[in-house]
Protein backbone atom coordinates (compact mmCIF):
# COMPACT_ATOMS: atom_id res chain seq x y z
CA UNK A 1 0.00 0.00 0.00
CA UNK A 2 1.26 3.43 -0.95
CA UNK A 3 1.16 5.77 2.09
CA UNK A 4 1.24 9.55 2.10
CA UNK A 5 1.42 11.90 5.06
CA UNK A 6 -0.21 15.20 4.13
CA UNK A 7 0.52 18.33 6.12
CA UNK A 8 -1.63 21.36 5.36
CA UNK A 9 -1.36 24.87 6.68
CA UNK A 10 -4.93 26.11 6.74
CA UNK A 11 -5.64 29.79 6.19
CA UNK A 12 -6.06 31.67 9.49
CA UNK A 13 -9.59 31.47 10.87
CA UNK A 14 -10.69 28.77 8.41
CA UNK A 15 -9.84 25.56 10.30
CA UNK A 16 -13.39 24.82 11.49
CA UNK A 17 -14.80 25.30 8.00
CA UNK A 18 -11.99 23.20 6.47
CA UNK A 19 -12.57 20.34 8.92
CA UNK A 20 -16.32 20.41 8.27
CA UNK A 21 -15.82 20.28 4.49
CA UNK A 22 -13.10 17.63 4.81
CA UNK A 23 -15.44 15.43 6.88
CA UNK A 24 -18.45 16.04 4.65
CA UNK A 25 -16.85 15.87 1.20
CA UNK A 26 -13.17 14.89 1.05
CA UNK A 27 -13.19 11.97 3.50
CA UNK A 28 -16.27 10.19 2.09
CA UNK A 29 -15.05 10.65 -1.49
CA UNK A 30 -11.60 9.31 -0.66
CA UNK A 31 -13.20 6.27 0.95
CA UNK A 32 -15.56 5.68 -1.99
CA UNK A 33 -12.55 5.73 -4.30
CA UNK A 34 -10.81 3.02 -2.25
CA UNK A 35 -8.48 5.07 -0.06
CA UNK A 36 -7.67 4.13 3.52
CA UNK A 37 -7.68 7.17 5.77
CA UNK A 38 -5.50 6.09 8.68
CA UNK A 39 -5.74 9.19 10.84
CA UNK A 40 -6.20 12.95 10.89
CA UNK A 41 -4.92 15.53 13.36
CA UNK A 42 -5.32 19.25 14.00
CA UNK A 43 -2.53 21.22 15.69
CA UNK A 44 -3.74 22.83 18.92
CA UNK A 45 -1.62 25.97 18.61
CA UNK A 46 -1.15 26.12 14.85
CA UNK A 47 -3.19 26.19 11.67
CA UNK A 48 -1.92 22.71 10.81
CA UNK A 49 -4.06 19.82 9.59
CA UNK A 50 -2.21 16.52 9.11
CA UNK A 51 -3.58 13.27 7.77
CA UNK A 52 -2.28 9.89 6.71
CA UNK A 53 -3.82 8.05 3.81
CA UNK A 54 -3.06 4.98 1.81
CA UNK A 55 -4.03 3.55 -1.52
CA UNK A 56 -3.40 0.16 -3.05
CA UNK A 57 -3.48 0.52 -6.83
CA UNK A 58 -0.99 0.62 -9.69
CA UNK A 59 -2.51 3.95 -10.81
CA UNK A 60 -1.26 5.68 -7.66
CA UNK A 61 -2.76 8.07 -5.16
CA UNK A 62 -3.01 11.25 -7.20
CA UNK A 63 -4.61 9.80 -10.33
CA UNK A 64 -7.36 7.99 -8.47
CA UNK A 65 -8.57 11.13 -6.69
CA UNK A 66 -7.67 14.22 -8.65
CA UNK A 67 -8.66 12.70 -12.01
CA UNK A 68 -12.08 11.63 -10.74
CA UNK A 69 -15.22 13.43 -11.96
CA UNK A 70 -16.48 13.44 -8.35
CA UNK A 71 -13.47 15.50 -7.22
CA UNK A 72 -13.88 17.92 -10.11
CA UNK A 73 -17.53 18.41 -9.12
CA UNK A 74 -16.77 19.58 -5.56
CA UNK A 75 -17.97 23.17 -5.46
CA UNK A 76 -16.80 25.17 -3.72
CA UNK A 77 -13.40 23.54 -3.82
CA UNK A 78 -12.36 22.57 -0.27
CA UNK A 79 -8.72 23.28 -1.21
CA UNK A 80 -9.49 27.01 -1.10
CA UNK A 81 -8.83 26.80 2.67
CA UNK A 82 -5.29 25.48 2.22
CA UNK A 83 -2.50 28.06 2.37
CA UNK A 84 0.30 25.52 1.97
CA UNK A 85 0.39 21.77 1.35
CA UNK A 86 3.21 19.33 1.86
CA UNK A 87 3.16 15.62 1.33
CA UNK A 88 5.63 12.94 2.25
CA UNK A 89 5.66 9.40 0.92
CA UNK A 90 6.14 7.21 3.97
CA UNK A 91 6.47 3.52 4.76
CA UNK A 92 5.97 1.57 7.94
CA UNK A 93 8.95 0.19 9.81
CA UNK A 94 9.13 -2.60 12.34
CA UNK A 95 9.57 -1.08 15.80
CA UNK A 96 8.79 -4.08 17.97
Image (cartoon, grey):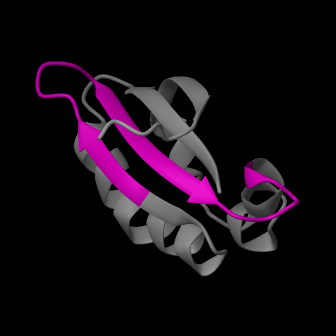
Q: Is residue 72 left or right of residue 58?
A: left
Is residue 76 something that shows in the picture? no
Horizontal and vertical percent for residue 12?
A: 29, 22
Q: Where is residue 39? Give x, y as percent.
A: 34, 53
Q: Which of 35 and 45 is in front in this view?
A: 35
For the N terminus, the quadrant is: bottom right
Residue at 30% x, 58% y is 20
| Residue 14 in view of the camera | yes
> Image point 23% across, 37% down: which residue?
42
* Magenta-span inclusion, residue 58: yes
Q: Where is residue 5 in the image (x, y as percent from the top left)?
A: 50, 36
Q: 3 or 72: which is nearer to us? A: 3
**Where's the C terminus, which quadrant?**
top left
Q: Nearer the viewer, residue 92 or 68?
A: 92
In the picture provided, is 84 more to the left or to the right than 57?
A: left
The image shows a total of numbered marks equal to 0
User: What is the magenta range?
Assistant: 38-61
Amino acid sequence: MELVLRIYTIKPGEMAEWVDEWREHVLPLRRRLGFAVLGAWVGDDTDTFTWLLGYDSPDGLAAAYYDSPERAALDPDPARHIAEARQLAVRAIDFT
